[in-house]
Amino acid sequence: MNTVKKLKIALVSITLILSCKNEENSSTKNIINSEDDIAIIDLKTDDENTEIDYLYVTSTSGLSLREYANLQSEKLAIMPYGTKVKIISSELNPTMKVGEISGGMDHIEFNHKKGFAFNGYLSQYFPPEKGISAKKYGEELLLLFPTVNYSETISGTASNPINTEILALPEMQWHEAFYMAQQLFNIPKKFVFPSLKGTDKEIVLGGELKKESRVSELQITRKNELLSKIKYKYKNKGFTKIVSIYKEGGKIIIENVEEIK
């Protein structure tokens, strides 16, 4: 009997030990699965956070990188026209005004330096390089922005040709379009971005004209004290050029019409 009891006790002990080991193995598996799940979640989160926003400097004279988010703080660097900068955080609400341009100070990184820059001169669209044609620039924009449209038409006659170019850009502000048009279609730099508010009709003359010139002026149209159209007109003997900027269908349109007589 003692022998039988001892055998029973031994069997029960072995069963308990095996059961404990199985529970430990099961617990270990659960922990590994849980850690794997956490690792997957972390990876997804990292992937979501790998998207980096960049903007481009549109000021032809360059843009200051400042130590703090105000225009009086120390300049850390000058970022040249066309520079691509990394955006750390954006100031969505306008907090200041430079000339006639409203904006705020974005926290950015440039050349391994972090600081702040006025976002009125930062754009999602890379600005046109000097001398580039509107057609070539439109083609380059289209590679990154499928909703951008460029078209060109030639009308008139052989002796009186009329060439029309249209660049349509979504999510663009008036001042961005003005400076883009200025670069693409040779609007004189003496013309600055006009005020959003003012009289319904305003004409700004281009100063002294060359002898052969007849007209060089900026025509500004407003409605309810807001911009509705900006037009640059240049005319001399046998040649007329009109660059118009206006909104249509949720986009800003830059239109250049050149006529030879």
Image (cartoon, helix red, strand yellow):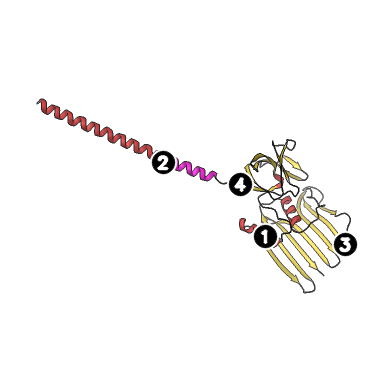
Residue, disc 4: 53
Q: For the residue labelled by badge 4, is the local secondary structure a helix, a strand or a loop?
A: strand
Q: Please tell me which of labels 3 and 1 falls first in the chain.
A: 1
Q: For the residue labelled by badge 2, is the local secondary structure a helix, a strand or a loop?
A: helix
Looking at the image, which residue sits at the far top?
Answer: 2
- Amino acid type at circle 3 is Arg
- Amino acid type at circle 2 is Asp
- The part of the chain drawn in magenta is 34-50
Residue, disc 3: 214
Quadrant of the drawing holding the N terminus: top left
Q: Between label 3 and label 4, give the one nearer the viewer.
A: 4
Q: Between label 3 and label 1, give the one nearer the viewer.
A: 1
Residue 192 location (% of width, % of height): 80, 50
Q: Residues within 10 Å of mark 4 (few under 14, many from 20)?
A: few
Determine the CA span between mark 2 and mark 3.
Answer: 76 Å
Residue, disc 2: 36
- Amino acid type at circle 4 is Asp
Residue plotted at (79% across, 61% down): 242
Q: Residues within 10 Å of mark 1 (few under 14, many from 20)?
A: many
Residue, disc 1: 138
